[in-house]
Amino acid sequence: SEPLRRQRVTVLGATGSIGTSTLDVIARHPDRYQVHALTAHCSREGLLTQCLVHHPSVAVLAEERDAAWLRDCLSHAGLATEVRAGEAALVEAASAAEVDVVMAAIVGAAGLLPTLAAVRAGKRVLLANKEALVMSGALFMDAVARHGATLLPIDSEHNAIYQCLPPEHRGGLSRHGVTQLLLTASGGPFRGWTPERLATVTPEQACAHPNWSMGRKISVDSATLMNKGLELIEACWLFDARPEQVQVVVHPQSVIHSMAAYSDGSVLAQLGNPDMRTPIAYGLAWPERIDAGVEALDLFQIARLDFEAPDESAFPCLRLAREAMQAGGTAPAILNGANEVAVEAFLAGRLSFPGIGELVGEVLESLPVEVGDDLETLLAADARAREAARSRLDRR
Ligand code: NAD
Ligand code: MG
């Protein structure tokens, strides 16, 4: 058979949970992939270890101080990796001419500009960084179409739905006979808890997810159900769905990763073990399939699949996200910015667990929604939301 040209991959957020899983899949296929760039915020030791294994052409850290340290270590090890610092270097690593594939796995709004740069450079973009899309939905999807980027969702639910839709699904779900997207949710570690008990939740409890091992921010989002809210918004943009067309279904086993319902009564589901290497391998190899290192699903061991409705009164974040999507304009950017500040404050012990939803709700109520969807307007809305959240925190 014809020899493949190896795909050159940039991993934004390489040292995180998704970044590490991505490098695990890549290492299984040295004939198909080679690493162009690896980036991290400040975990320089972790990035050093990854550079020694994957020999990237470029490595990026946030601060020049850390970059200088890494540069020194790598040159002692005899590697020619170019080490850079700062946001311009991130954007360059995401959009360089020699890059084919970009894994967007930075957490939060910090990933927006490099992810957008990859889209604008027409790359194959594997989107884990849901906050980037939530903040800038219309602008982001418009850039995908305009620049001919290939956008593949890595969030397990959206990857599942992608697999359950016809190959060409643009132009509205109903054109393809799809009536509803069924977004499954584990319900998080506090499913079924009363509001009184939720008030006692600690960061350690919130970060111990029953089915998935993830970064701290998304773990807290999963516990508040804000993650499902962000995913609802993400689904609307990715699949051209209205918020009413996305139904959240609590499914504690996390075996069905999501579903698409069709007008003839068919419901298509994607199942698998809860291991992010499956959607990552799907995104890397699409439309082909490759080994992801994931164990085969054993249905006899799983034995049963349960479903229930989400409790939106104990977990208001899901409702806040749906309302923000319905409001449109800058509302999702405000929701996301306020949530990032609230989650940080909760992790730092400055805000209670129910305080997260309260704070996000207060910020959304206090700020006007603007219709503009240009980058300046969105970044300004994000900044205002953070400022409003911080000043409310100080007054609490
Ligand atoms: P993580 O905290 O484990 O890793 C985040 C990565 O981003 C790290 O490499 C970190 O160095 C880098 N980073 C953090 N802040 C940065 C900044 N300001 N500038 C540049 N780089 C920065 O997070 P994760 O769990 O891997 O999640 C990454 C993204 O993927 C998130 O948007 C999350 O919602 C999404 N996601 C994660 C999972 C999962 O299973 N972990 C599943 C679905 C979606
Ligand atoms: Mg998900």
Image: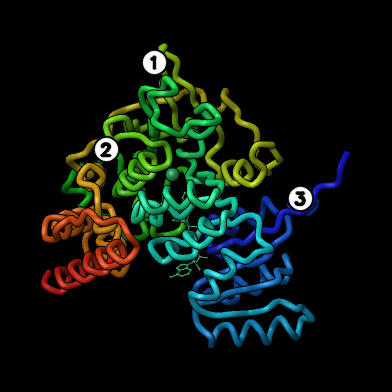
| Res 335 → quadrant | bottom left
Q: Which amino acid does label 1 sit on?
A: Ser
**Residue nearest the observer in this picture, 20 or 137:** 137
- Classify residue 40 as left or right of residue 316: right
Q: What residue type is labelled 2?
A: Gly
Check disc 1 and report its element: helix, strand or loop.
Answer: loop
| Distance from Cα at disc 1 to Cα at disc 2 | 33 Å
Q: Label 1 belongs to which residue? A: 263
Relative vertical location of residue 18 with respect to residue 346 in this rendering, above or below: above
**Residue nearest the observer in this picture, 374 or 187:** 374
Write down which quadrant ligand 2 falls in: top left
Residue 248 position in % (x across, y down): 32, 33
- Classify residue 184 as left or right of residue 340: right
Residue 282 position in % (x across, y down): 61, 41
Is residue 160 shown to the viewer in this render?
yes
Q: Label 3 belongs to which residue? A: 32
Q: How crowded is mark 1: few (under 14 residues within 10 Å), some or many (20 or more)?
A: few
- Classify residue 51 as left or right of residue 91: right
Please tell me which of labels 2 and 3 falls first in the chain: 3
Please tell me which of labels 1 and 3 falls first in the chain: 3
* Image depth: mark 2 or mark 3 in front: 3
Relative vertical location of residue 393 with respect to residue 205 in this rendering, above or below: below
Relative vertical location of residue 9 with respect to residue 265 in this rendering, above or below: below
Q: What residue type is labelled 3?
A: Arg
Q: Label 2 belongs to which residue? A: 192
| Distance from Cα at disc 1 to Cα at disc 3 | 39 Å
Residue 261 position in % (x across, y down): 41, 21
**Residue nearest the observer in this picture, 177 or 21:** 177
At 72% from the left and 54% from the top, the residue drawn is 7
Check disc 2 and report its element: helix, strand or loop.
Answer: loop
At 40% from the left and 57% from the top, the residue drawn is 132
Q: How crowded is mark 3: few (under 14 residues within 10 Å), some or many (20 or more)?
A: some
